Image (cartoon, rainbow, N blue to C red):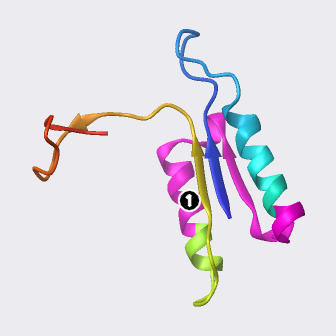
Amino acid sequence: MFAAAVADYPGEVNDLTYTTSDAKVFASVMQQRYGVTADRVRLSLDADATQSGIEAGLDWLAQNAGANDRVYIFYSGHGNTGPDDNGDEDDGIDE
């Protein structure tokens, strides 16, 4: 299970309140209710939840998941937009 969250954005205008606690609660619920062991949980929060940090977490998940395992990915934070790169968006923007 991999969870990433960003609450602390550059400046103060875009900061969020509950994202990192949401990720921690999700990880806790997965452990307590669904039996996911601590060694199968990875969190990437705030300054660690950069593009490279999230890629590293996904790589860790791929390396540690077995063929018949179920994986969970959780993200909490602002999204992003950019130009539609394959023509599948009516508004011309990928979110």
Magenta segment includes 74: no
Q: Position of residue 6 (x, y in %)?
A: 61, 34
Residue drawn at x 82%, y 55% is 29
Residue drawn at x 56%, y 74% is 62
- Dividing the image into 4 quarters, which one contains the C terminus? top left
Q: Is residue 44 above or below residue 41?
A: above
Q: Is residue 67 above or below residue 59?
A: below
- Disc 1 residue type? Ala
Q: Is 86 left or right of 55, judged from the image as shown?
A: left
Residue drawn at x 85%, y 71% is 35
Q: State the residue position of label 1.
A: 56
Q: Which residues are magenta?
A: 31-59
Quarter assignment of residue 92:
top left
Q: Is 2 left or right of 62, judged from the image as shown?
A: right
Categorize mark 1 by other alpha carbons within 10 Å: few (<14), some (14-19), many (20+): some
The outermost residue toward the bottom is 67
Q: Position of residue 58 (x, y in %)?
A: 55, 63
Query: Under tag 1, what secondary structure?
Result: helix
Predominant SS along the magenta part: helix
Q: Position of residue 54 (x, y in %)?
A: 54, 52
